[in-house]
Image (spheres, helix red, strand yellow):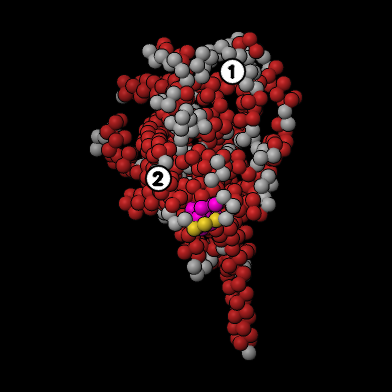
Amino acid sequence: MRAGTAVQAAKRRSASKASTVYLFALPATLLFVVFIAYPILWVAGESLYTGTADGRAVFAGFANYTTILSDPTFWIVVRNMVLWGIITIPVQMLIGGLLAYFIERHTHALRGFFRTMFFLPVVTSVSVISLVWVQIYAPYYGIAQEYLKHVGIVMMTSPIGDPKTAIYALIVVNIWQWTGFSMLMYIAGIANLPSEVLDAARIDGARGWRLGVHVIVPMLSPATKSLLLLGVIGTLQTFPIVHLMTGGGPNRASEVFGTFIFKQSFVLGDTASGAALSVIVLVIALVLSLVQIALLGARLSPAGKDEP
Amino acid sequence: MMTLLSRNRIRGVVIHAVLFVVLGFWMIPQVYMLSIGLRTPAQAFDAALFTWPVTFDNFVTVIRDNPLGGIFLNSLIITVATVAIVVAVSSLFAFSCAILRLKGSMLLYTTLLTTLMVPLASMVLPLAILLKTFGWVNTYIGLILPYAALGVPFAMVILKAFMEDAPRELFEAARVDGCNAWQTYWHVALPLVRPALVFVTIWQFIVTWNEFFLALIVLTKSEMKTLTIVPMQYSGFYMANPGALFAVLTLIALPLILLYVLVQRAFVRGLLAGAVKG
């Protein structure tokens, strides 16, 4: 009798458990469905329609995509994004990695100070940073042209005002802002290197550069792969620095996906081509991410601890 | 032995010197910003990193003339609410995957993870239309919920990994003692992953506070604007007065910098703890 009620009670409990435990997963799922999945499906659908003069939406197949792909600005954007990625990502890794190495392995009392100071650009509002750099680059009263002429670099105009140099000038700002992030990722990696391996390598005679290049660099590859993955996604969503410093100009020379989408969707109000562009950026991001995850085993978290 | 020791010391001094020189160059933009903010109108356009004398007049002017308190409050409300939702929602979800191991939770987890590969640039148009449909343009909630949805996956990854690393016996013991799932979550799981909660809180705070793209589109009324999107306004307003412009930019950048300096130790500790199991 007692055993029977116990079993019943246990059954009731597990029944109520089964229904309420799903509440743990519900809020995250709801947020995802409403604010991520639904908007993506909507934009994918919208990209196949085109508006008419009387405000009706007409199915257009891939017409919006062909229009975008035949727009010369699109190919300027692609070129700029490739430049952005292949310059920004390795330079940030190199400077961030070197800083991390020297800070972690050769400083003690000042370690926290250096870690914090080099990270400050990351926590400084990007709109503030952009305006400061506009001032730095400014002709006549900016400090870049004033000080760089002492090392033989003469700037007649602002580098962001020249179509040939604008994108590089913006890349410099981006590198400056985000190198602290790469540094911190490598610091996490270096601080957690197993000391037995380092000691063994040192006993084998590996020191200085050889220890760094042959032992530490390979052991930091999880951090490097995460930075590559985050760097590619970060490149594709570049917006504030470009929007605030050049607006994609001069003459669209520094246009990136973010500013292009912004103009098509919100300045021109051309939702159809804005939607097609959004889908293109999304597909590029997913393909590049999945390729890295599949080929390199790259991970999405900074700690390099989770599965992709 | 002596020569080795002193050679190490010399190397230490050289490395510190190099780091300080690099840091000096690295800090130029911030130093320059503060320096222009401290100039008199006569020096404002000097092409120099430092000028003398300095004045605090610009700071007095911009604080007196601008509703910086209200803008700061907008940033604070949006950021704190987003962080609270992200931490609550992602820890509940991580618990359901890592501890309860609900049927289907891993599939859901993988689905939510795809969010991390979605560039915000491709989300602004559909989100803007969605928020317009909801009537949420120029509201706090119109930024808070999308920010939360974009932030949850990253926090969930970190928290799930920490919960999986916690000793399972503790959760078994809680069950034997008669704790239900909610009690186990609150009294066992959350305290165990505290460093991760701190890390996720700080990171989400930084990201939300500095978010620009969506805020630019959703917040068009000036009384709703956040600290991140007002600098453009000021750059037009104070075009002829760089001293005032850079004073207000300094004030806008300051809160998050000060906060980070205060919490950086806990932040780095969380980051280091997360990497232990490579």
| Picture coordinates of residue B238, whole percent (x, y) | 65, 22
Residue B195 visible (yes or no):
no
Residue furthest out toward the right: B64
Is residue A88 found inside the magenta-colored segment of the image? no
CA distance separating discs 1 and 2 = 46 Å
| Picture coordinates of residue B189, whole percent (x, y) | 57, 58
Query: Residue A245, relative to residue A236: is it above or below?
Result: above
| Secondary element type, mark 2 | helix
Name the residue type under label 2: Leu
Residue underneath mark 1: B35
Left or right for A144, reference B67: left
Query: In this picture, which residue range is highlighted in magenta?
Result: A39-52
Name the residue type under label 1: Ser
| Picture coordinates of residue B195, whole percent (x, y) | 55, 47
Instruction: Identify the residue at image location x=53%, y=45%.
Output: A270
Left or right for B57, reference B159: right
Is residue A42 found inside the magenta-colored segment of the image? yes
Q: Do tag 1 and tag 2 residues touch (Cβ < 8 Å)?
A: no
**Chain under disc 2:** A
Residue underneath mark 2: A69
Q: Residues within 10 Å of mark 1 (few under 14, many from 20)?
A: many
**Residue nearer the viewer, A268 or B92:** A268
**Residue nearer the viewer, A61 or B138:** A61
**Chain under disc 1:** B
| Picture coordinates of residue B20, whole percent (x, y) | 46, 22
